[in-house]
Image (cartoon, rainbow, N blue to C red):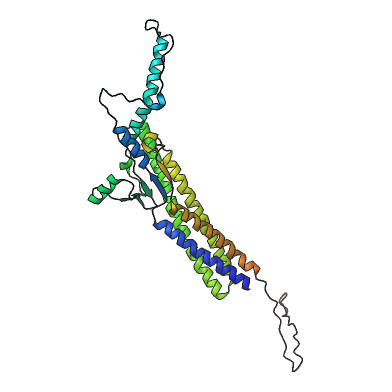
Amino acid sequence: MATMRILTAAGLFLAFCALGLLTMAISTDYWYETDARRHRERCKKYASKRIDPGYIYISNQNLPLRMHPNGNGVERTKTTEGALLRVRRESLAPAAGIESRCSRRFNSTVTGLWRKCHREGFDLENEDLIFKGLIQRCTPVKYYYSSASIPRDLPINITKTIRQDEWHALHLQRMTAGFIGMAVSIILFGWMVGLLGCCKENELMQYVAGLLFLMGGTCCIISLCTCVAGINFQLSRYPRYVYGLPEDIGHGYGWSMFSAWGGLGLTLLAGFLCTLAPSLHTPQASSGSSGGGGGGGGTLTHKHRQENGIV
């Protein structure tokens, strides 16, 4: 009996801690983080280079450039000219790639279930604009379809693909928020049932509480896996030059995501303990004692059962 109470109390305590971690994860914005400081510094260095006609910038990784040994200008063939043009295009490709990447503005942001915010202290220009009130630090995450997020002046087939991807990404976002809300509600209800069962020493209520914790953990698993799938889908969307991230931008999961995973682990452990506790209780045999004056010996009383209407 004491072991059952200890396991039930431990399960309820872990479920309470899981509720705290999940509530913290839902109410904070550090699910996914990006760090664009290195990318912005690289673009600033590229923009600060001289662009007048008298200055020619050649990247170090393209040096040295050597001419072909049969270097008579008269004896050059079309294949040689084609090779030289190919070498020239390859030498200009890195600079063109940097210029195309720097044409888009990437910010250091944190994203949660409800908001997307600029990271404080990562970009002085954005901090100045936020201080002046020209831009907002946080913008709400939309859970409804809006055609304003689709880029303009694109071919019709790319526009259709982007529209379909928008609906798919929106579906993943809704699943993430919906299932983690269901998980918190089920775990809270299970905690209340388990507390009542512990106070009344009702084994069935404790077992039901354990099943509710396992059900809430299942909803939490679906929510977190959907969140990871949604982030990976956003990074792999087509066209890549619109939705992809350059290689020099750091990105990853934040502490809110790890808080949610910790709440998931505690929930499953609490469900295991609460379902295990009632099985450790062995029911005692009830014996009826007939009160004799000095003997004190108990005799078992068996009740007659009714068979075919005859007692």
Q: Nearer the viewer, residue 130 or 203?
A: 130
Q: How many marks?
A: 0
| Left or right of residue 272: residue 75 | left
**Can residue 155 be seen by looking at this rendering?**
no
Q: Residue at x 55, y 71 (%)?
A: 197
Q: Residue at x 32, y 39 (%)?
A: 105
Viewport quadrant of the N terminus: bottom right
Is residue 226 at all visible to an observer of this figure? yes
Point out residue 42 in the picture as x, y percentages from the top left corner: 35, 36
Depth check, front residue: 306 or 82: 82
Q: Residue 220's x, y, as percent?
A: 49, 55
Residue sitting nearer the eye, 219 or 140: 140
104 up-or-down from 131: above or below: above
Residue depicted at x 42% and y 47%? 171
User: Which residue extends farthest top?
Assistant: 74
- Would you identify the image quadrant in which residue 214 lies? bottom right
Residue that lies at the very extreme toward the bottom in this rendered image? 293
Vertical relation: 305 (above or below) 61: below
Q: Against 35, is 25 above or below?
A: below
Name the quadrant containing residue 284: bottom right
- Closer-to-camera residue (123/226): 123
Q: Quadrant of the C terminus?
A: bottom right
Q: Residue at x 38, y 26 (%)?
A: 93
Locate residue 189 relative to residue 42 in the image: left or right: right
Tell me where residue 12 appears, x and y as whole percent: 53, 67
Q: Residue 103 location, x and y as percent?
A: 31, 34
